[in-house]
Image (cartoon, rainbow, N blue to C red):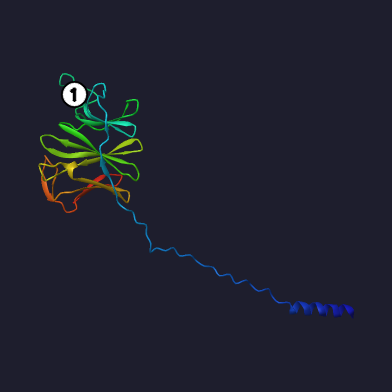
């Protein structure tokens, strides 16, 4: 009899025991705010004149201009010919005035392609004060100006960007007088402060209005937009 009573008491306790309440957890999903986008501001390259290096000598090379830039030497000039003939390192396809970069030991660590018959191959320097990169534009000329080659000096290395085959429609000014350079969205843009421009000066002489004409380098190629 006692055993029966004990069983009944146990069943009563089990029946009356409340089920545990499940904890109500509220999960909040974070939705990113897309109303605010990062704005990339234009960084303007500022023209500057590096310190000149007087009396720099390079064997077999006529130095016309030399500048000290970030511990290296940037040199414009040409290899000497022998008896009026093209000799190495010049070739029939690659000769004329060019750009060199020398390290602190005066060893040539970069040389551009030769500019052929150009009388002038004069470097101009523009600096991005945010990342330290330097654009070098070598103004070219015969009896007239005919654009310039563009290079970027980044972390001690030079890369050729391409040729700016353009000039102002003004005989008193040249490309580097009207050139403005800026960088944004990982692109380098070359614009021109003048009303009229000449495309392919000296060959086709295409005169156009400057309706936001620009060259853009996208780290793959340099392209003209007009």
Q: Is residue 60 left or right of residue 132?
A: left
Across and down, in percent, residue 5 comes to: 86, 80
Q: Considering the image in quadrants, where does the N terminus appear?
A: bottom right
Question: Residue 129 falls in which quadrant of the image?
Answer: top left
The residue tagged 1 is 86
Whole-percent x and y of residue 111? 27, 31
Q: What residue is rendered at 12% in x and 34% in y?
A: 142
Q: Secondary structure at mark 1?
A: loop
User: Residue 213's x, y, as percent?
Assistant: 19, 50
Using the image as rendered, state which of residue 129 and residue 87 is in the foreground: 129
Q: Using the image, determine if residue 99 lies above or below residue 189.
A: above
Residue 128, located in which quarter of the rendered image?
A: top left
Residue furthest top in the image: 83
Q: Dot 1 surroundings within 10 Å: few (below 14), some, or many (20 or more)?
A: some
Of residues 164 and 52, which is closer to you in this image?
52
- Residue 159 placed where, x, y %? 30, 38
Instruction: Work out whether residue 60 or residue 9 is closer to the camera in this orientation and state it.
Output: 60
Residue 154: quadrant of the picture = top left
Name the side, left or right, on which 101 lies relative to 198: right
């Amino acid at each position: 009899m006692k055993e029966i009573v004990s069983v009944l008491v146990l069943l009563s306790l089990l029946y009356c025991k409340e089920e545990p309440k499940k904890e109500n957890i509220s999960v909040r999903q974070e939705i990113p705010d897309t109303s605010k986008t990062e704005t990339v501001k234009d960084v303007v390259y500022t023209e500057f004149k590096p310190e000149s290096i007087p009396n720099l000598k390079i064997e077999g090379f006529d130095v016309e201009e030399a500048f000290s830039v970030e511990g290296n030497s940037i040199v414009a000039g040409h290899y000497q010919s022998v008896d009026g003939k093209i000799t190495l390192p010049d070739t029939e396809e690659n000769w004329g005035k060019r750009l060199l970069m020398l390290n602190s030991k005066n060893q040539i660590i970069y040389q551009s392609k030769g500019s052929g018959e150009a009388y002038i191959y004069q470097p101009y320097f523009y600096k991005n004060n945010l990342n330290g990169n330097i654009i070098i534009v070598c103004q070219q000329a015969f009896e007239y100006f005919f654009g310039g080659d563009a290079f970027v000096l980044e972390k001690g290395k030079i890369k050729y960007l391409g040729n700016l085959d353009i000039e102002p429609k003004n005989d008193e000014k040249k490309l580097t007088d009207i050139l403005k350079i800026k960088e944004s969205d990982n692109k380098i843009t070359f614009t021109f402060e003048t009303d009229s421009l000449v495309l392919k000066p000296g060959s086709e002489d295409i005169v156009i209005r400057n309706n936001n004409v620009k060259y853009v380098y996208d780290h793959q190629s340099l392209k003209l937009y007009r």
